Image: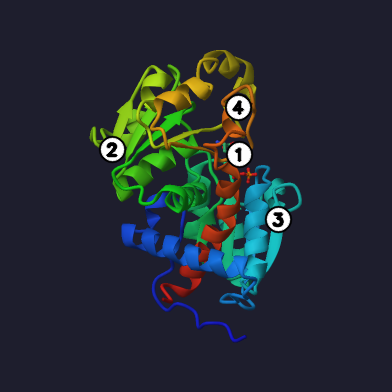
Amino acid sequence: MASTPPQTGPLRHFLQFRDLSRDEIRYVLDRARLIKDKFKRYQPHHTLHDRNLAMVFEKASTRTRVSFEAGMYQLGGSVIHLTTGDSQLGRAEPIEDTARVISRMVDLVMIRTFEQTRIERFAAHSRVPVINGLTNEFHPCQILADIFTYIEHAGPIEGKTVAWIGDGNNMAYTWLQAAEMLGFRLHVSAPQGYQLDRKRIGQPSDTVLREFADPMQACRGAHLVTTDVWTSMGYEAENEERRRAFADWCVDAEMMAVADPAALFMHCLPAHRGEEVTGEVIDGPQSVVWDEAENRLHVQKALMEFLLLGQVA
Ligand code: CP
Ligand code: NVA
């Protein structure tokens, strides 16, 4: 099958959620629906025939690697997998030089790394679109999948309430960007010292963000309850301190009981049962975590297609 001609407009990256406009997010989510439906019917969808994706992992991954790798092959393209350890990045080649070189050879790059500034430096020297596969600051592909999953199970997310229970981390900051853009409210409950940093977020309006000391209060009436590990990658030295601080931030049946009766539970995974969530909740009837994980595949296929081809429908 012939590939679709390249997009002629300006170079686009997806380094944080708000790099796409609200309309573009809606387009990608709609396109993901079509791509998922075709996948389920075993219909080929080779819109990125002969295109090549380089994936650079400076942190571990299961879902991100498999979903990008499988996704690019399913679109008719191919993938190169690099890590810090097996590339010259591990021997201090500047990220700018790595970007200049890789982006002359492939059509698209996905990076999982530490500071957001590192992926921004890469993107600033790249000739091709760059996708954030997780940084310390953001995890935009995951939130794209989470919103797709919410819509799939419960309809539009506009006007709904999402409760974030636990660390004010990369996921929480990305949820906040999505709430601001898509018109839903975020309730956040994090232990003292782990809340969202005002220096980063400014003063979001009360219709976008409400913060709660008590996680039960944050869950009250929520349409989606979601959490994440107590210790994110890169913060392992704080593990013991965090275990103590987060002991009361475990999503359990009591918290789910005060949420909306139809509330969903999500977790980006990997999960630690008995820490940030009980087995009863993550393996229970309100949990949609396996659909959420699968949907990484479909939304990222739509995203890669959008970054390379623009809006094709
Ligand atoms: N949720 C997520 O990004 O999972 P991985 O760390 O396994 O890629
Ligand atoms: N907040 C977690 C997400 C893992 C997918 C981390 O950064 O490790």
Picture disc at residue 269: 1
Picture disc at residue 208: 2
Between the C-alphas of marks 2 and 4, the distance is: 30 Å
Q: Earlier in the sequence, mark 3 or mark 4?
A: 3
Please tell me whether mark 1 sits on a helix, a strand or a loop: loop
Amino acid type, label 4:
Glu
Q: Is mark 1 within 8 Å of ligand 1?
A: yes
Q: Is mark 3 within 8 Å of ligand 1?
A: no
Please tell me whether mark 3 sits on a helix, a strand or a loop: strand
Q: Earlier in the sequence, mark 2 or mark 3?
A: 3
Question: Residue at image x 62%, y 58%?
Answer: 98
Identity of the residue furthest to the right in this view: 86
Q: Nearer the viewer, mark 2 or mark 4?
A: 4
Please tell me whether mark 4 sits on a helix, a strand or a loop: helix
On the image, which quarter does residue 225 sit in? top left
Amino acid type, label 2:
Val
On the image, which quarter does residue 37 sit in? bottom right
Q: Nearer the viewer, mark 3 or mark 4?
A: 4
Closer to the camera, 102 or 294? 294
Badge 4: how crowded within 10 Å, few (<14), some, or many (20+)?
A: some
Q: Is residue 299 above or below residue 17?
A: below
Badge 3: how crowded within 10 Å, few (<14), some, or many (20+)?
A: some
Amino acid type, label 1:
Leu
Question: Residue at image x 45%, y 77%?
Answer: 7
Picture disc at residue 280: 4
Q: Do the residues under discs 2 and 3 have CB atoms within 8 angstroms?
A: no
